């Protein structure tokens, strides 16, 4: 399951990185892959979320992203350690995860209004297709054409893409070299549509591939010209932590950690993942300077403890008495009670003294 999630992450990242290096206006790289667009087009990914799970031999990756482009045709290139399989994922996957991991609403009550004296509350046919590049499989998923590629040379892979109408910049070909030397494969997802362009949320992908560890390909994003943000949803048997060299760079923050009940999810993908791995760890990683900060793929290991964590959002509410802030209202009521008591006591004292004078006069 983890491998499936990782694959999806890799696909998303690869697509984003390729897009960033299209021979067109600069596009933004993202995660482990990149977009490759038709020559003269511009594609960028604005957001990306990825779900990762791994069962010890197979990784599963669920990938969601938005695209910004003026093109009706583009491709996502994702490196994977072994040939990958791809399918369409439920569109509800990430909206469900947002609900499951949403910050806990904590209500704090105050008796006094803020008077400004302190801080306020915070809120193709399979086979060879060009020298050095082999197309292992091709299938159509709705508006997506998915091909599994094997390449023994980054330059040849770039030329293959060029021959098929897509152009990578030299910097992206250079970034692919480590994957090529390690014998990785590539998932190329061609996006086609009848719409005027591909801008907007793309259909989530469900990717699986064999892997001997949970890994999230990120090295292509080191070529990104702009800052990068990645959110990973990692399902495992325990809370996980990052174990790669890149984890000490940029800004890494925990968003959520805890068990997810089967009753909290309904999409087929999440139901199957939670049935095998119910502990979810969500982390956000921001890179202001990807070139110097992204130096490895993401890898994950078991954390020291399974201590749960959830963001909290505080809301301050005013306690009221008859529509009036309780503090001032009760203070006024108290003062009135005291005043009435003082007046009553004063009246009793005067009446007692008068009776005493009358009694003395009568005696």
Image: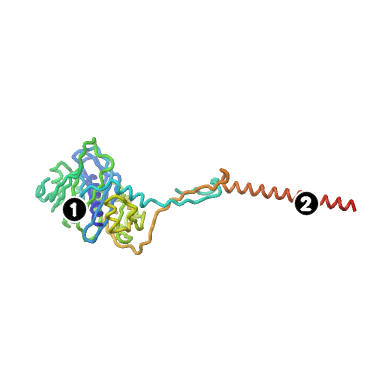
Give whichever of 278, 9 is nearer the camera.
278
Q: Residue at x 31, y 62 (%)?
A: 302
Taking 158 as reference, is 338 left or right? Answer: right
**2 or 1: mark nearer the eye:** 2
What percent of the width, then of the height, locates residue 255? 36, 54
Query: Is residue 222 something that shows in the picture?
Result: no
Within 10 Å of disc 2 (Cα), the crowding (few <14, some 14-19, many 20+) is few
Task: Check disc 1 and report the residue beneath it.
Answer: 84
| Residue beneath the point at 29% across and 48% down | 48
User: Residue 207, position in %: x, y?
Assistant: 22, 51
Disc 2 element: helix
Q: Residue placed farthest to the right in the image? A: 363
Residue at 45% over, 52% down: 106
Picture coordinates of residue 195 (x, y %)? 23, 36
Marks 2 and 1, how far apart at CA:
96 Å
Location of residue 304 by image quarter: bottom left
Q: Residues within 10 Å of mark 1 (few under 14, many from 20)?
A: many
Does residue 45 appear in this view? Answer: yes
Residue 349, label in figure: 2
Q: Nearer the viewer, residue 90 or 84?
A: 90
């Amino acid at each position: 399951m983890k491998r499936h999630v990782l694959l999806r992450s890799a696909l998303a990242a690869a697509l984003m990185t390729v897009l960033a290096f299209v021979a067109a206006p600069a596009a933004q790289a993202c995660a482990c892959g990149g977009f490759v667009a038709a020559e003269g087009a511009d594609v960028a990914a604005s957001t990306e979320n990825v779900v990762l799970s791994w069962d010890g031999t197979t990784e599963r990756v669920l990938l969601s992203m938005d695209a910004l482009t003026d093109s009706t045709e583009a491709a996502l290139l994702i490196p994977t350690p072994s040939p990958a399989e791809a399918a369409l994922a439920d569109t509800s996957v990430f909206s469900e995860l947002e609900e499951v991991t949403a910050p806990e609403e904590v209500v704090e009550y105050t008796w006094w209004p803020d008077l400004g004296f302190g801080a306020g509350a915070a809120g193709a046919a399979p086979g060879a297709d060009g020298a050095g590049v082999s197309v292992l499989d091709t299938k159509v998923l709705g508006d997506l054409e998915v091909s599994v590629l094997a390449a023994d040379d980054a330059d040849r892979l770039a030329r293959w893409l060029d021959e098929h109408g897509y152009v990578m910049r030299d910097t992206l070909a250079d970034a692919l070299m480590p994957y090529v030397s390690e014998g990785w494969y590539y998932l190329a997802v061609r996006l086609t549509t009848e719409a005027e362009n591909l801008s907007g949320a793309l259909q989530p992908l469900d990717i699986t591939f064999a892997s001997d560890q949970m890994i999230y390909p990120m090295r292509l994003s080191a070529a990104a010209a702009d800052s990068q943000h990645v959110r990973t949803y990692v399902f495992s048997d325990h809370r996980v932590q990052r174990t790669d060299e890149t984890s000490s760079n940029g800004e890494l923050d925990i968003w959520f950690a805890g068990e997810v009940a089967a009753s909290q999810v309904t999409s087929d993908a999440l139901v199957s993942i939670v049935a095998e791995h119910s502990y979810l760890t969500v982390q956000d990683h921001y890179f202001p300077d990807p070139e110097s900060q992204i130096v490895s793929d993401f890898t994950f290991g078991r954390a020291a403890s399974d201590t749960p964590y959830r963001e909290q959002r505080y809301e301050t509410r005013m306690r009221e008495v008859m529509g009036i802030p309780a503090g001032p209202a009760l203070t006024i009521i108290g003062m009135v009670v005291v005043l009435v008591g003082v007046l009553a006591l004063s009246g009793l004292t005067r009446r007692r003294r008068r009776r005493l004078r009358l009694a003395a006069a009568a005696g």
